[in-house]
Image (spheres, rainbow, N blue to C red):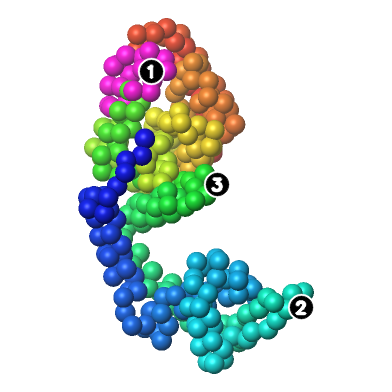
Amino acid sequence: MTTTLTHADPQVDAVRSFNRFYTRVIGVLQDGLLHTPYTLTEARVIFELAQRDRAEVTTLRRDLGLDAGYLSRILAQFETAGLIIRERSATDARRQLVALTDAGREVWRDLDRRSADEVAVLLRRLGDVERQRLLGAMDSIARLLSASESQRAPLVALRPPLPGELGWMVQRHGELYEQAHGWDARFEAMVAAVVADFGAGHDPAREAAWIADIDGCPVGSVLCVRRDDETAQLRVLLVEPATRGMGLGTRLVDECLRFARRAGYRRIVLATYSAMVEARRIYDRAGFTVTSATPVRHFGQDLVEEEWSREL
């Protein structure tokens, strides 16, 4: 059910407040965009023309959502300044084509460089994790407000855990394994001990954690930790059920393997259970083989504990 909003709704105010903030951040309130003589709309017209050899004016107007008279005035100014040329279509004289001149493309290159430089300045204020969060949030806004949202691929990222996400790893392991396999709280306690040991003091050169992130939300995790000087151990691999089939488990395992090689390990091991059918497929595809299998009674269930390994 969709709630009907009025102009006085706090959610409306929140979006308007964000719009005011962001337009100030990117400088579109200045007389000239990026310290140039061009407005935001004029710069966007130049950008669109730069993406194609020539464009039909009607197509350009439709793509930009501009009023016909407003676009006509902009194009007249550009033609006077020598930035564009206009001609009739060879197949339909009623249609007008427009293209950038060499001078127009030079203006586009200058605008493009200035824009990239300004964004780089903004991003340099943020750390790697903060940048991923920003990009995920921006992609979410674009997808949610797009008429073709269902056709847009989600933004997937592997990144270090943010504050609180080590706890998320423990919580989701406990919840999902109880739901899927009936494992009791002792499993969650075991995961908590592994994660707490990592968080309490790991060597970043030889141990690492990754969160699989879709649109800024955690949906998977894995750890690579030291077993001994020559052996790494893959631990607590998790992928949210709703995102399985997207290859996230494989990506997490591959990232763990790459890190282990760079860290100087010669082999990598992991422990799992025969009931973990989907995870075992991922390990098999990644080149792991079973080195031992032992019947055990763990987490309130009769299980077969397995150790897998592979050379790096």
Q: How far apart, in angstroms, are the residues tagged by discs 1 and 3?
A: 31 Å
* Tag 2: amino acid: Ala
Residue at image point 27% right, 33% down: 167
Name the quadrant of the N terminus.
top left
Q: Name the residue under label 1.
A: 179
Instruction: Locate residue 232: give its quadrant.
Output: top left
Question: Which residue is depicted at the point 31% across and 29% down?
Answer: 170
Q: Residue 207 carries which label?
A: none
Q: At label 1, which amino acid type do we have?
A: Gln
Residue at image mark 3:
151
Of marks 1 and 3, the one in the foreground? 3
Residue 186 magenta: yes
For disc 3, the neighbor class at 10 Å (few under 14, some 14 to 19, many from 20) is few
Q: Nearer the viewer, residue 126 or 53?
A: 53
Q: Which residue lies furthest to the right in this view?
A: 91
The part of the chain drawn in magenta is: 175-194
Q: The disc labelled 3 sits on which kind of residue?
A: Gln
Foreground mark, 2 or 3, reads 2
Whether the residues at callouts 2 and 1 have beta carbons within 8 Å, the answer is no
Q: Is residue 253 among what the camera can see? A: no
